[in-house]
Image: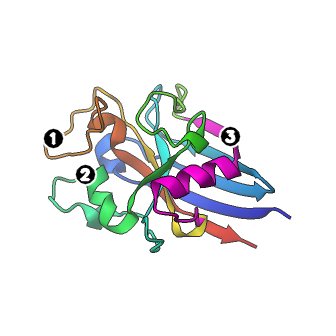
Amino acid sequence: MTTHYEAQLVPLNAEKIGSAAYGHASFDIDGDTLTIKIDMHGTPANTEHWEHFHGFPDGKQALIATAAQDANGDGFVDLPETEPVSGTTMVPFDDAPEKMDIPHDRYPVADANGDFSYEQKVPLSELSKNFKSSFNDEELQLDKRVIYIHGTDPELTIPDTVQGMVGHFDQHVTLPIATGQIEAID
């Protein structure tokens, strides 16, 4: 029996980045395989887009960020401003989500129209083991998580008040551009 989850992704920071990213994500668990599919449109073109699910390590329900999370009033909702409602970055949607290796450059790149599709089959037992190791024996609990799509044009002028540097990756890489609540589907 397959367990199915979905998320509708809506724009975040669209007024500031000049595009309104939107899309759809699905997660299907069948035995030891988690199949992740994400289709995005309206993202900054020819740009790599980090994508993850975020949540709280204690299993608290994560919610999507909105303009209301712009705590410093600079007009941008940056990565740290999402944390009070969405929690922390947990699982990357890259070439090997089960490894839970987040800061790197192996994420999807949008085409010239700002579209991209992502599909990955993930060994659920390995992902669960690494997730529990990273988050104090917490379960994946997809229906308590939210998705973020990140990344804007590296030439976009953003104020110094926008935070989110991760390693050598700057705020252009980590700025959230779309988000969605993951929900269980019967």
Q: Is residue 9 above or below residue 59?
A: above
Q: Marks 1/3: CA distance?
A: 35 Å
Disc nearer the start of the sequence (2/3): 2
Q: Is residue 93 magenta?
A: no
Residue at 28% from the left image edge and 29% from the top image edge: 168
Instruction: Indicate whether 185 appears above or below 148.
Output: below
Q: Is residue 23 left or right of residue 152?
A: right
The three-letter code of the residue at mark 2 reads Phe
Q: Nearer the viewer, mark 1 or mark 3?
A: 3
Tag 2 residue? 76
Task: Name the kind of residue labelled 3 in the image.
Answer: Gln
- Which residue is tagged 3? 120
Q: Are marks 1 and 2 in contact (CB under 8 Å)?
A: yes
- Where disc 2 sits, the SS reads loop
Relative to 96, 101 lies left or right: left
Start-end of magenta stretch: 115-141
Secondary element under disc 3, as helix, strand or loop, is: strand
Residue beneath disc 1: 159
Alpha-carbon neighbours of circle 3 within 10 Å: few (<14), some, or many (≥20)?
Answer: some
Q: Position of residue 50 (x, y in %)?
A: 46, 39
Crowd tier of the residue under label 1, counting other residues whose Cα lies within 10 Å: few below 14, some 14–19, many 20 or above:
few
For marks 2 and 3, give the CA distance.
31 Å
Query: Closest to the observer: 158 or 95?
Result: 95
The C terminus lies in quadrant:
bottom right
